[in-house]
Image (cartoon, grey):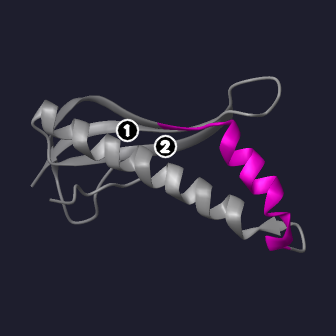
């Protein structure tokens, strides 16, 4: 079952009846990703790389899926205040982490 997510603190037309706690999901992209991305530089149109964008989207999807899986542990049925974040984890820019967090809630 797909868990409703929102970046706002409420769900339009729904009432939050219980706040169950913070949930988070993460995805880490390693060095091979960046090696492959730079090898695929021919995908660049202007200053955009379709390969890089697809990988970031995939990582964000993984982080949001993990977020949704964790909501079940807290017996909630939705997540509000979702905040995706992107962070480089090493000095060589070889590891990128995409994380997402929010508040597990019960809505009616």
Look at the picture and state if 40 lies above or below 99. Answer: below
The residue tagged 1 is: 102
Specify which label sits upstream in the sequence, 1 or 2: 2
Q: Which residue shows up at 70% across the image and 59% down it? A: 52
- Residue 44 located left or right of residue 60: right
Most prominent secondary structure in the magenta stretch? helix
- Residue 4 located left or right of residue 91: left
Front residue (pair 10, 66): 66
Q: Quadrant of residue 75?
A: top left
Magenta segment range? 27-44
* Quadrant of the frame with the C terminus: bottom left
Q: Which residue shows up at 55% across the image and 59% down it? A: 57
- Residue 100 located left or right of residue 18: right
The residue tagged with tag 1: helix, strand or loop?
Answer: strand
Asked if disc 1 and disc 2 are in contact, CB closer than 8 Å, the reply is yes
> Any magenta on residue 32?
yes
Look at the picture and state if 6 lies above or below 41. Answer: above
Query: Disc 1 to disc 2, how far (Cα)?
Result: 6 Å
Q: Which residue shows up at 63% across the image and 37% down it? A: 30
- Residue 19 located left or right of residue 37: left
Crowd tier of the residue under label 1, counting other residues whose Cα lies within 10 Å: few below 14, some 14–19, many 20 or above: many
Look at the picture and state if 103 lies above or below 10. Answer: above
> Any magenta on residue 12?
no
Whole-percent x, y for residue 76 in the image: 14, 41
Q: Quadrant of residue 42?
A: bottom right
The residue tagged with tag 2: helix, strand or loop?
Answer: strand
* Number of the label disc, if any, that sits on residue 83: 2
């Amino acid at each position: 079952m797909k868990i409703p997510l929102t970046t706002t603190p409420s769900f339009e037309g729904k009432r939050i009846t219980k706040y169950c706690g913070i949930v988070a999901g993460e995805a880490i992209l390693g060095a091979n990703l960046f090696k492959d991305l730079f090898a695929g530089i021919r995908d660049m149109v202007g200053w955009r790389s379709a390969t890089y964008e697809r990988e970031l989207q995939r990582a964000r999807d993984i982080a949001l899926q993990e977020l949704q899986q964790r909501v079940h542990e807290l017996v909630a049925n939705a997540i509000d205040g979702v905040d995706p974040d992107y962070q480089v984890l090493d000095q060589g820019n070889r590891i990128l982490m995409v994380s997402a967090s929010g508040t597990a809630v019960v809505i009616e």
